[in-house]
Image (cartoon, rainbow, N blue to C red):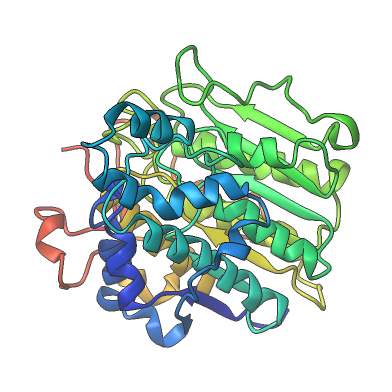
């Protein structure tokens, strides 16, 4: 199999804009500083600046009323004191209150996020990359006429529709965020052109409340959604095993030979995420190891043509943990973990390093752990990757590793 080409959506201007998101202030800057500066992966990636999305791009999915509201929301906010009740109704109608407040730069933000994902899909459509990464995308809660769950625009749906319009008629969508992908699922609930596989937590009162195993699609979309709820405190080992085995079965029995793959790589399942304190118990490497396993499944060794893959960000409210996780995921996609073997050690004290080349799709780095280590993800670290000095380096003290210690 040929070496894959990896596109990476980034520009300094876009990073300043996306770092203004109220739920994730500064996260974008930390992600790109760690991946591109600290670990110097810019030379191994095809760096492409995002082209801001247009109003017509939004209208491929979102209603014209909602798009107009997004574009005018900042002006409405300025006028709110004069017509408080009327403007309050306006914001509430389109979900622009509570978890999705209007903020300075909102219109510019949604153009940049949606535009970044569309720039990524066009890299894939034009065969300029085999994998396209946009860590500032992945906003899976936004609905056609309403913002929701820190998501003002559904760039995922826009990206999938763009792939469809270019002839990629069968898209496999996988969501690794701890919250269910309600916006994406509702968008494609009635179609067989998108198979949705979501791994999330589904508990009474847990946002967004959708994603039960019984939800499998409607009409032509029947049996094209597979919701896999995982319980609180799910460990990295169990998460990777569930995702790998489920995706393997999807490709074998339910949705073989997709034309394209889209993966939302939310990091809010990592332990002690401030928004989900009683959520899963994943380390910073779990999502990256899942992505590596998924790529092995969709790219058989003898494949002459690689299925295009779009990797997107999502949740993750500990910015340093999100930066760790997406940096490591980028390494796994580039297959360069071996370059950092001297820094990767078992924290249990063993001297051997861990193989970055699994023997098969079901054996990732984490499967090399001893049974003793598997006894408790909550109390033991498996391995670490030392973080080089960079702009935000001091924020990782005293550990200075991609992994966040339990100490």
Name the residue: 60% across, 81% down: 5
| Residue 202 shows in this picture | yes
Q: Name which quarter of the figure residue 397 lies in.
A: bottom left
Name the residue: 51% across, 74% down: 334
Taking depth in this image into account, of 2 and 109 the one nearest to the observer is: 109
Task: Say left or right for 57 vs 320.
Answer: right
Name the residue: 48% across, 40% down: 147
Task: Say left or right for 397 vs 86.
Answer: left
Taking depth in this image into account, of 67 and 235 the one nearest to the observer is: 67
Q: Position of residue 249 (x, y in %)?
A: 78, 41
Q: From what the image shows, is residue 341 above or below residue 205?
A: below
Taking depth in this image into account, of 376 and 392 the one nearest to the observer is: 392
Instruction: Work out which quarter of the rendered image holds the N terminus and state it.
Output: bottom right
Name the residue: 39% across, 27% down: 279
Q: Which residue is outermost to the right?
A: 220
Q: Position of residue 100 (x, y in %)?
A: 37, 39
Instruction: Work out which quarter of the rendered image holds the C terminus and state it.
Output: top left
Q: Name which quarter of the figure residue 396 lies in.
A: bottom left
Q: From what the image shows, is residue 390 above or below residue 244?
A: below
Q: Which residue is outermost to the top?
A: 204
């Amino acid at each position: 199999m040929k070496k894959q080409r990896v596109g990476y959506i980034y520009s300094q201007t876009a990073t300043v804009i996306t770092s203004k998101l109220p739920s994730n202030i500064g996260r974008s800057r930390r992600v790109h500083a760690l991946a591109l500066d600290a670990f110097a992966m810019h030379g191994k990636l095809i760096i492409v600046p995002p082209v801001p999305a247009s109003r017509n791009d939004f209208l491929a999915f979102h209603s014209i009323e909602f798009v107009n509201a997004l574009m005018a929301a900042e002006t409405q906010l300025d006028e709110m004191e004069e017509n408080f009740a009327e403007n309050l109704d306006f914001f509430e109608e389109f979900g622009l209150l509570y978890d999705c407040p209007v903020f300075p730069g909102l219109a510019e933000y949604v153009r940049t996020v949606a535009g970044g994902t569309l720039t990524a899909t066009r890299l894939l459509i034009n065969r300029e990359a085999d994998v396209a990464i946009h860590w500032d995308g992945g906003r899976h809660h936004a609905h056609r006429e309403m913002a929701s769950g820190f998501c003002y625009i559904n760039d995922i749906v826009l990206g999938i529709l763009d792939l469809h319009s270019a002839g990629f008629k069968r898209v496999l969508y996988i969501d690794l965020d701890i919250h269910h992908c309600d916006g994406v699922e509702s968008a494609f609930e009635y179609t067989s052109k998108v198979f949705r596989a979501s791994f999330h937590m589904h508990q009474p009162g847990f946002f967004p409340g959708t994603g039960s195993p019984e939800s499998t699609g409607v009409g032509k979309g029947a049996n094209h959604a597979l919701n896999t709820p995982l319980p609180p405190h799910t460990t990295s080992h169990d998460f990777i095993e569930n995702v790998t085995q489920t995706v393997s079965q999807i490709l074998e029995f339910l949705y073989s030979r997709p034309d394209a793959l889209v993966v939302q790589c939310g990091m809010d399942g990592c332990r002690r995420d401030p928004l989900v304190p009683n959520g899963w118990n994943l380390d910073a490497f779990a999502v990256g190891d899942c992505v590596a396993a998924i790529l092995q499944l969709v790219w058989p060794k003898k494949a002459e043509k690689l299925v295009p893959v779009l990797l997107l960000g999502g949740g993750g409210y500990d910015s340093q943990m999100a930066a760790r996780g997406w940096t490591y995921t980028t390494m796994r996609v580039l297959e360069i973990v071996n370059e950092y073997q001297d820094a990767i050690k078992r924290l249990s004290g063993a001297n051997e390093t861990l193989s970055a080349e699994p023997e098969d799709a079901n054996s990732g780095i984490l499967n090399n752990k001893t049974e003793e280590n598997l006894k408790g993800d909550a109390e033991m670290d498996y391995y670490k990757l030392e973080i080089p000095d960079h702009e935000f380096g001091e924020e990782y003290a005293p550990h200075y590793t991609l992994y966040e210690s339990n100490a």
